[in-house]
Image (tube, rainbow, N blue to C red):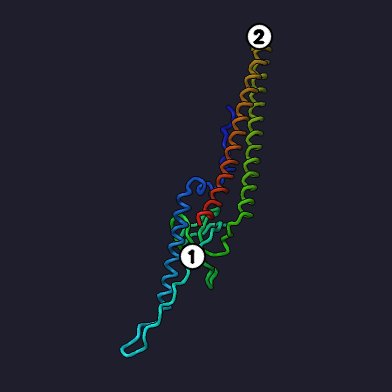
C-alpha cells in the first residue's frame, strides 16, 4: 500500500492557526487597542492637578488627554509562558507601546494580555512576511519531494515483489502469472503512482495558496487601521 500522503510537516505550523481564525487576531488587536486607551486615560488622570482648596486658585483648564500608545504587530520568535500569558513561537502578538526598563512589553496574544520579553519578538513587516512566505514554500516543496520519493520506492517494491512471485510460480509449475498479466499489473501500479503523484501536487498547490492567503490576511489587518 502506498504511504499515506501527509504534508503536515510543511504546513504553516503554529501560524496556521492565524490563517484559520482571523477573528481571533481581530479580537486580540481590539483588546490591545483598549489597553492602550485605558493606559492613556489613567495617565491623564494621574497628571491632572488636585482640585483647589477653599480660597485657593481657580481651577485651570484640564490638560488634553494623552494619545493612546501605538499598537503594533510582532511575530513571536520563541515560546514564552507566564501566569498572565502563553505565547508560542510563530504566533502573531499585538504589542502596546514601548519596552519598559526591564525590556518587557505589554502584549496581547490568544485573548490574553501580559508582559513579554521584547527580545523574543520581531516586528511584522512586509520584508518579514516575504521571508516567511519563501520559507513556507521551501518547506512545502521539500516535503513534496520526500513524499514523492517514498511513493516511488513503495511502487518499485511492489513491482519487484510481483515479479518475484510470478517467477517462483512459473518455476514450480503452479500456473504463475503470464508475462501479459505481469505487464498489466505493473501498468496498474504505474497509473496508481501517477494518480498519487498528482494528488501530492494538488496538495502542494493548496498549501502554497494557503500561505499566500495568510500573507494577505496579515496585510489586511494593517489596512483596518
Depth check: 218 or 223 in front? 223
Q: Which mark is residue 54?
A: none
206 with respect to 51 (left or right): right
Q: Which mark is residue 106?
A: 1
82 with respect to 215 (left or right): left
Badge 2 element: loop
**Nearer the viewer's eye, disc 1 or disc 2?**
1
Across and down, in percent, residue 50 comes to 37, 82
Across and down, in percent, residue 28 comes to 46, 56
Give the residue drawn at x 48%, y 59%: 81
Give the residue drawn at x 35%, y 85%: 52
Depth check: 49 or 86 in front? 49
Query: Quick check: 91 above or below 43?
Result: above
Cα separation, mark 1 vs mark 2, equals 80 Å
Give the residue drawn at x 43%, y 78%: 47
Residue where numbered disc 2 is placed: 173
Extreme left residue here? 54
Across and down, in percent, residue 123 comes to 58, 59
Depth check: 116 or 206 in front? 206
Amino acid at each position: 500500500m502506498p504511504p499515506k500522503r501527509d504534508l503536515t510537516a510543511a504546513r504553516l505550523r503554529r501560524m496556521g492557526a492565524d490563517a484559520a481564525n482571523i477573528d481571533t487576531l481581530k479580537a486580540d488587536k481590539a483588546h490591545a487597542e483598549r489597553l492602550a486607551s485605558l493606559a492613556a486615560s489613567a495617565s491623564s488622570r494621574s497628571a491632572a492637578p488636585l482640585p483647589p482648596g477653599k480660597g485657593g486658585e481657580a481651577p485651570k483648564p484640564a490638560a488634553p488627554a494623552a494619545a493612546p500608545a501605538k499598537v503594533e504587530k510582532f511575530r513571536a520568535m520563541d515560546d514564552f509562558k507566564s501566569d498572565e500569558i502563553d505565547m508560542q513561537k510563530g504566533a502573531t502578538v499585538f504589542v502596546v507601546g514601548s519596552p519598559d526598563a526591564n525590556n518587557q512589553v505589554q502584549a496581547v496574544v490568544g485573548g490574553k494580555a501580559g508582559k513579554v520579553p521584547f527580545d523574543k519578538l520581531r516586528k511584522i513587516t512586509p520584508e518579514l512576511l516575504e521571508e516567511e512566505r519563501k520559507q513556507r514554500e521551501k518547506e512545502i516543496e521539500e516535503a513534496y519531494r520526500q513524499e514523492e520519493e517514498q511513493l516511488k520506492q513503495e511502487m518499485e517494491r511492489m513491482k519487484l515483489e510481483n515479479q518475484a512471485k510470478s517467477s517462483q510460480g512459473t518455476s514450480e509449475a503452479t500456473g504463475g502469472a503470464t508475462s501479459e498479466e505481469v505487464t498489466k499489473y505493473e501498468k496498474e501500479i504505474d497509473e496508481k503512482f501517477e494518480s498519487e503523484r498528482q494528488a501530492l501536487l494538488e496538495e502542494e498547490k493548496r498549501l502554497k495558496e494557503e500561505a499566500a492567503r495568510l500573507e494577505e490576511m496579515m496585510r489586511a489587518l494593517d489596512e483596518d487601521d
